[in-house]
Image (spheres, rainbow, N blue to C red):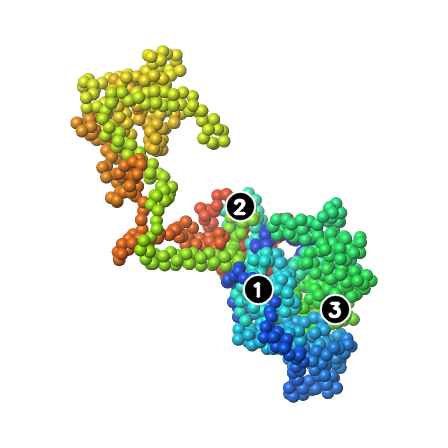
Amino acid sequence: MSQRPGTHVPAVRAESEKNLGITQRSAAINFAWTGDIRKRYTDFLVNEIRKDGTVLHLRDFEENGAAPQPQVDRKASVANANQPENKPKVHPISEDDRKAVIDLLGESVAQKLIDLDGKVQAKKPLEPKERTVVFDPVTDRSKRGTIHQEIRRIFRSRFETVADANGIISATASKWALNSRAGGQNWGNGRRDNNRYRDQAREFAEAGGEYLHFTLYKENKDTMDAVNTIARLIKIKASNFGFAGTKDRRAGTVQRISVYRQKASNLIWLNTRIPNVKVGDFEYSKEPLQLGQHGGNEFIITLKNCQPLGGENCSLAQRMKMLQQAVECGLAYLKHNGYINYYGLQRFGTFSIGTHLLGMKILKGDYEGFIDDLLHVDEDLIKEVLSSNTPQPYGVGKDAQNSRDDQNRARAITTWRTTKNAAKALEFLPKRFSSETAIIRHLGKNPKDFTGAVLSITRGMRMMYVHAYQSYVWNFVATRRWSKYGAKVIEGDLVLVTGSRCRDRSVDDEFNPYDDNDEDNIYAQAHALTAADVASGKYTIFDVVLPTPGYDVSYPRNELGDFYVEFMGKEENGALNPFEMRRKQREFSLSGNYRPLIGRLIGSPQYAVRAYSDDTEQMYPTDLDYALHKKNAARLAKAIAELEARRDVKPAPNPVADPVVDRWAHFAQNPATYDNALAAERRRKAEEEPPADVVPVTNETWVQTGVDGSAKRVKLARHHQQIENQTENGPSHGGDISATIPTGNVDEPQDDANRTPFPVGNGASLTEEARDASASRIITTGPFPMIPLPKGAIPTTGIRGVSDSYYAATGQIPYFGPLPEGFKMQTAVAGGDTPQVQHAETNVNVNAPEPQADGVVPGAQQPSPKGPATEAKPKSPDAMGWYGTSLPEIPMAPADPADGKTPEDGPALVKAEEQGGVSSNIDIVNNVIVPKLRTVSDNPLSVVNIEVDESSIDPTADKIAVVLKFQLKASNYATIVLRELMGTTAEGVAL
């Protein structure tokens, strides 16, 4: 069976809904916006609501622990080794219970049942016909329910009772019963030694009860798939588990599960074994969880690629505002007026042949046709399988896994159809396809037993198929009712009888442990409204219910009652009669139930509109994100506590420390500080050195050769330049010396001997021979002439250790060529550190004060004798003499005033909620931004004047997402709410 096309796309989803009768909307207003549903599984989050109204969350989980080991009772083993095997003890029922059984069943049948119970407890071998006691027919449904309950209570679930279509109840010992329920697993089944059983009972009683309750978080798995996987890994039956309701597969869901007599340590290790599944929050209880024991579900749904109708040419901010207004109005309407309570798409499966069509085949008795449809494979998949001889390999991601499973399913079914080799086919079939597995396995042994093959499927799955057909009929009837009469209450409508009770799920003949979507509104009686009832105004559209087809329900006494017969009687709908819903197979005899026509939200919904760019972005943190965030915060708190503890603990009297390692570590972490210190030391030495007449400086020209950004270079030339400075015994020319720098073309051919050096880039001349000049000194912050940075030149001084970023910022570089005539220094401008230079068109007049006798130029910044302008601190020794007294100090923790010892320093820690140590109003959980949700107002026009903060929009964003948060009853579908909320677009109308 091929997968139904992706229904997250609005157009595809609308077509699928139309085929299932989902065509009407309760609102006359078209909210006119659309979006994609479930672009990723965690865009659809579901949290179970408990009976007290609290929302269930996965608070914590552990990831350690080992696989459960078989438990061995050593005391019992030693006793059994030294003594003959003890005979099983029989626990007779009390006298009061004996009388109760006789009153219910009659003395003859009651005695047979009591005798059978004694044989079962005594572990006596029984023939198949001796394992069951058949009761007299009981036509009263309430009395049948009492019998079911009392038999289970009195005999402590040692018997499984079922009733057929004629009201005949049969009781079969649980050891041989085909189906057992979560409430009575493994009691008195004789498989354990009595002593061991009592020890375990005492142990679990002290812990709080025999049932371990835990929270299950899962992604891309339905509830039964997750439960079956857990059961297989811990080597117990799936019937030992109980739960309040099933949850969607294509979602991230949280629900409570119970398991019989298991320790938490047996389940903790599963957190690292099963992908996309986490278990935690363990608690023991005396009772198991059963279907319906919850108050509904909370949904947090992200719709992506959202577009308002008519917003194609609008800006992103305008479209966001349009969507905000549409969502506000839509949610306000649904909050007060409700929505048509259709069964959603997931009710009918994800394959091209829906579960309702399979259920129709079962109700028609066409079991062979049911098997053919169940084992259907799309032709494209068959061709793909036949072209490859190997199973589909593992892919990457959840979508790849689903595609791989579908292809392996197609391979298994193709193998079965072509070879009839069940064993070979089952080698390919993934375990999650339990119905297909059961069919192939049974037909491999009994090729013509189609009835037995259908019955080999689990009871819950069989019931799911027939219930899907009931839902299919209900959807079309609801569409007919709303399209003709709308919200008007009419004569013949059905309402629930006041005081009528809901059926007991544990004794209902149609009990389905896999389906909770139709359990919330099953009532014993419904009343058809008369004209007087309608005129009284006592009833509203919220009171109207419609039945699903069954033999124990009333149909509307108006045109809708005839529509049931008309619709179901069509050949394409099975040619069935709604008044003839009993079948030879008891479980296929459908009694029917009632479902409200209009559904309502629980509480006030919330929403947020966000801009984004990537469809894979997680818009709202999952429970797993919150749990991981909590773990990270706990680890952070622990690290802080350990750091504080280390600071409080005094170090050892003689701590072992390597000063060389400490200095090297500090150098590696602070290279800029050491560079500055090195440059300062070199400047100091340059100032203290005696003047020389001629200082030859060698410069080299290199060309970068690596185009990949590497440091490969080639030396082109080696140059010499002479640097001259004024000294105390300098030229006797007086104060002003006039000089002219030639302005000829650098490329102009000249004789090198007569060529005047021209400063290029780093101030080096292109002459290759040294020239005599007066003594010079290199002081980058001293009275040195500064010239504009030539165009295209590299801002470098040629002095190693001095940062060139300074010169790049000022746009000037020091001039190291021969001093021109008319050279005169000028005092640095206040607040600056660079002497100023006067320029002419062809001359450069540089004015500066005369140096004093001590060599200090007035007005020039001089290095501080105490080093950098920082707090005076003791310096570390400079063994190599590179840095002098300017060697940076290695930071030390404050000394303890008590003993002067220094505790060990630790890493800087930042709060998990504060990225980079900066507080922010944005909540971030496990790197997922938590959107600020807005609660829907009773006045939707209140958002008209609310502007979208464009400054908060990511400049790279080009798409819009809407995050919704609302609560529903267990039987209602979130996708139906989304359908009503979004309304229709131009594309949707075209369908």
Q: What residue type is labelled 1?
A: Leu
Q: Which amino acid does label 3 sit on?
A: Phe
Q: Position of residue 497 (x, y in %)?
A: 64, 75
Q: Is residue 66 visible?
A: yes
Residue 560 placement, left or right of 245:
right
Residue drawn at (76%, 78%) of the image: 130
Q: Which of marks 1 and 3 is nearer the N terminus?
A: 1
Residue bearing mark 2 = 613
- Given this view, does label 1 or label 3 mark the residue nearer the observer? 1
* Residue 79 position by quadrant: bottom right
Residue bearing mark 1 = 267
- Given this view, does label 2 or label 1 mark the residue nearer the observer? 1
Q: Earlier in the sequence, mark 2 or mark 3?
A: 3
Residue bearing mark 3 = 588
Q: Position of residue 133 (x, y in %)?
A: 75, 79
With respect to residue 195, does 432 lie above or below?
Answer: above
Secondary structure, mark 1, is helix
Question: Spatial distance from mark 2 to mark 1, Cα to Cα?
Answer: 39 Å
